[in-house]
Amino acid sequence: MTGTRVKASHAAPSSIISPLSTPRTLLTVFRPSSFGLAILDKRLHFVGVNRALAAMNGLPERAHPGKKISDVVGTVASRIGRVVERVFETGQPVKGVTLSAKLPARKEMGHWVEDYLPLADHAGKVSSVVVLAVEVSRWVQEFGSPSHPYAGGQIGRPKLSSREVEIVRFLAQNKSNKEVSSILGISVKTVEAHRARILLKLQLDSLVGLVHYAIRNRLVEL
């Protein structure tokens, strides 16, 4: 469950989901997004996915609707299923779930950070669960396990400068130090120094943790 471009914003992708959202509208809104989106029913079948999620799973969009998640993601389906069932039972979202798995249609191990959100029908009953996924495989390959617990509070505790917030956003968009350097007109060494300082401030030991931070503090959006 690869993204390209993520627009920086103070609104989280989950804020797009409202009481008026339907599977069809969400699939339309998220179709061009770099965030993966899947909609699952109570039987743990796919209602639909967007392009990004289809690419993460290694299958076309059209191959997902009606299929059991186990047919698409393999053994990790049992863990996903437990989270989905919890959302159906409680009506509450589950955020920041980290998953690592070798999917049937992919050659390499993949790593993701996912939010699971309830989608209600007109009567207010949870009718499906929306999964928002960001792939962090690149960071895991370079910096290690995605299971580092989220650290750091809201922006401002500790305080990040406006430049540091910019750099957090770009790094969370999967941009390299060289790309950030070119965009901001600063040297690669300056970007590296900012990155090291940010990780120290936030008490994080990898860019995987930084992705968690950016998502939870609403620094990136579709």
Image: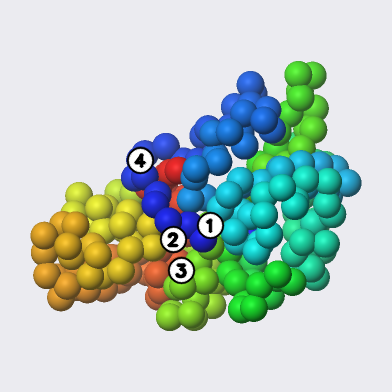
> Farthest right residue?
43
Q: How far apart are marks 4 and 1 (CA)?
A: 16 Å
Q: Residue 31 occupies which quadrant of the picture?
A: top right
Per the image, label 3 sits on a secondary structure element best described as helix
Q: Judge by depth and name the residue closer to the eye, 37 or 59.
A: 59
Tag 3 near tag 4, CB within 8 Å: no
Looking at the image, tell me whether mark 2 or mark 4 is earlier in sequence order: 4
Measured from the top left, where is residue 123 in percent x and y? Answer: 79, 19
Tag 3 near tag 2, CB within 8 Å: yes
Looking at the image, tell me whether mark 4 or mark 1 is earlier in sequence order: 4
Q: Mark 1 points at which residue?
A: 134
Q: Distance between the residues labelled 1 and 2?
A: 9 Å
Q: Judge by depth and name the residue closer to the eye, 60 or 83.
A: 60
Q: How far apart are marks 3 and 2 (CA)?
A: 5 Å
Q: How far apart are marks 3 and 1 (CA)?
A: 11 Å
Q: Which amino acid does label 3 sit on?
A: Val
Residue 187 as seen in the image, left or right of residue 155: left
Residue 57 as seen in the image, left or right of residue 221: right
Q: Mark 3 points at which residue?
A: 208
Looking at the image, tell me whether mark 3 or mark 4 is earlier in sequence order: 4
Q: Name the residue under label 2.
A: 211
Please tell me how crowded label 4 is: few (under 14), some (14-19), or many (20+) other residues with Cα within 10 Å: few
Q: Which amino acid does label 4 sit on?
A: Ser
Please tell me how crowded label 1 is: few (under 14), some (14-19), or many (20+) other residues with Cα within 10 Å: many
Looking at the image, tell me whether mark 1 or mark 2 is earlier in sequence order: 1
Q: Residue 112 occupies which quadrant of the picture?
A: bottom right
Q: Which amino acid does label 1 sit on?
A: Val
Q: Mark 4 points at which residue?
A: 9
Looking at the image, tell me whether mark 3 or mark 1 is earlier in sequence order: 1
Tag 1 near tag 2, CB within 8 Å: yes
Measured from the top left, where is residue 126 in percent x and y? Answer: 78, 32
Residue 179 as seen in the image, left or right of residue 103: left
